[in-house]
Image: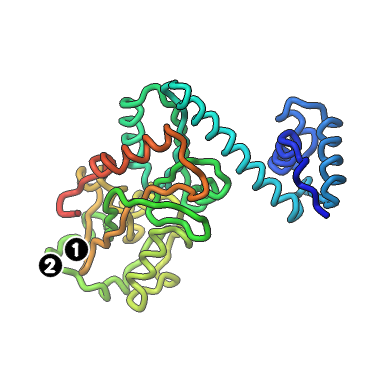
């Protein structure tokens, strides 16, 4: 029988450190312990559970399925301990706490201003802002590394609560001297079939939306000239004349204002999605994170970029 009741916090932290580092010596250094002490913690835990938690590979120690389960348990434990500390500080009447915010890359054009404004309202709250792509942000949610995420589409496969705080338009852009940029009337989608398009990477929210909107009109496989995970690189490529791009309107405010990019008047565009706040359903928000959640719901739309003619 697997006995989990007597597993200690120190043992769980040892398992998590070994999984992160792949070596006993590196895990010991992270935990400020000696390698023999970490080895002993691991041996005691494996003997108690009757399961191997790691296997040796050329890349280092890799967690088994049982090890992965304990790594996830350790992450949940650390999140619960941190939340308990915030809750106790709130009960004690201390004004403070912390909030860890995950932001997808497309939101970096407004999220820092939003977070800074929240920080000015609540200078006693410690804020950590993590900016990454969609996969990285979902991984942070899954591993309990962040309290709240700002993203364009809620994740699947994670029990989550979500709330919309603003519209998120997507448009087709071109260099200002492109022939289609001079047309004032609606441009039918089939006219894009002969154009080279620069697309976000497979799995990104923007790419998924493009494939849904232009299915049967433009083949993503034949259209791709460059496929990249950076909005900045895509914008530079469009300005250089390498092709057109379907992109979030919230990433191009400056370039449109300065005349370096043009928004094409494609029929039925812009495509309007939403910006979401997301947090794990099985993770109670600490007071500081709750304050951020409420602030974004009230003020978040005021920080979204504004481009004339785009709602």
Q: Which of 305 and 149 is in front in this view?
A: 149
> Which residue is identified by label 1?
265
The spot of residue 287 in percent (x, y) is: 43, 33
Q: In which quarter of the image is the N terminus?
A: bottom right
The spot of residue 239 in percent (x, y) is: 31, 51
The spot of residue 258 in percent (x, y) is: 21, 43
- Residue occupying image coordinates x 36% and y 75%: 215
The spot of residue 186 in percent (x, y) is: 16, 68
- Mark 2 touches mark 1? (CB < 8 Å): yes
Which labelled disc corresponds to residue 164? none
Of pointers 2 and 1, the one earlier in the residue sequence: 2
SS category of the residue bearing label 2: loop
Q: Which residue lies furthest to the front in this view?
A: 91
* Vertical comparison of 157 with 77: above or below: below
Q: In which quarter of the image is the C terminus?
A: bottom left
Scheme of image coloration:
rainbow
Q: Tell me if mark 1 has few (under 14), some (14-19) or many (20+) residues whose alpha carbon lies within 10 angstroms of its own.
A: many
- Residue occupying image coordinates x 25% and y 51%: 261
> Which residue is identified by label 2?
185
SS category of the residue bearing label 1: loop
Q: Quadrant of residue 38?
A: top right
- Residue occupying image coordinates x 29% and y 58%: 170
Q: Is residue 118 left or right of residue 23?
A: left
* Vertical comparison of 77 with 190: above or below: above
Q: Can residue 286 be seen in this view?
A: yes
Q: Tell me if mark 2 has few (under 14), some (14-19) or many (20+) residues whose alpha carbon lies within 10 angstroms of its own.
A: few
Q: Is residue 57 visible?
A: no
Q: Which of 144 and 20 is in front in this view?
A: 144
């Amino acid at each position: 029988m697997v006995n989990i009741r007597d597993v200690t916090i120190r043992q769980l932290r040892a398992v998590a450190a070994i999984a992160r580092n792949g070596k006993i010596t590196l895990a010991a250094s992270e935990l400020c312990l000696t390698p023999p002490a970490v080895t002993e913690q691991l041996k005691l835990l494996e003997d108690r559970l009757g399961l191997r938690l790691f296997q040796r590979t050329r890349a280092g120690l890799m967690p088994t399925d049982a090890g992965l389960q304990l790594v996830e348990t350790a992450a949940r434990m650390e999140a619960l301990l941190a939340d308990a500390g915030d809750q106790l500080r709130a009960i004690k009447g201390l004004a403070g706490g912390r909030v860890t915010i995950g932001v997808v890359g497309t939101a970096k054009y407004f999220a820092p201003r939003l977070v800074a404004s929240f920080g000015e309202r609540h200078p006693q709250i410690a804020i950590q802002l993590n900016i990454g792509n969609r996969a990285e942000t979902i991984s942070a949610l899954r591993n309990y590394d962040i309290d709240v995420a700002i993203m364009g589409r809620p994740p699947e496969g994670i029990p989550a609560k979500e709330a919309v705080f603003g519209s998120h338009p997507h448009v087709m852009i071109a260099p200002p001297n492109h022939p289609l940029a001079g047309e004032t009337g609606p441009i039918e989608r089939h006219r894009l079939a002969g154009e080279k398009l620069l697309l976000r990477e497979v799995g990104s929210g923007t790419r998924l939306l493009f494939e849904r909107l232009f299915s049967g009109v433009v083949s993503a496989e034949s259209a791709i000239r460059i496929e990249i995970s950076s909005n900045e690189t895509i914008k530079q490529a469009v300005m250089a004349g390498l092709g057109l791009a379907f992109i979030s309107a919230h990433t191009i405010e400056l370039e449109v204002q300065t005349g370096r990019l043009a928004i094409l008047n494609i029929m039925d565009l812009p495509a309007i999605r939403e910006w979401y706040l997301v947090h794990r359903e099985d993770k109670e928000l600490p007071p500081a994170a709750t304050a951020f959640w409420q602030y974004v719901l009230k003020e978040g739309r005021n920080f979204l970029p504004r481009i004339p003619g785009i709602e």
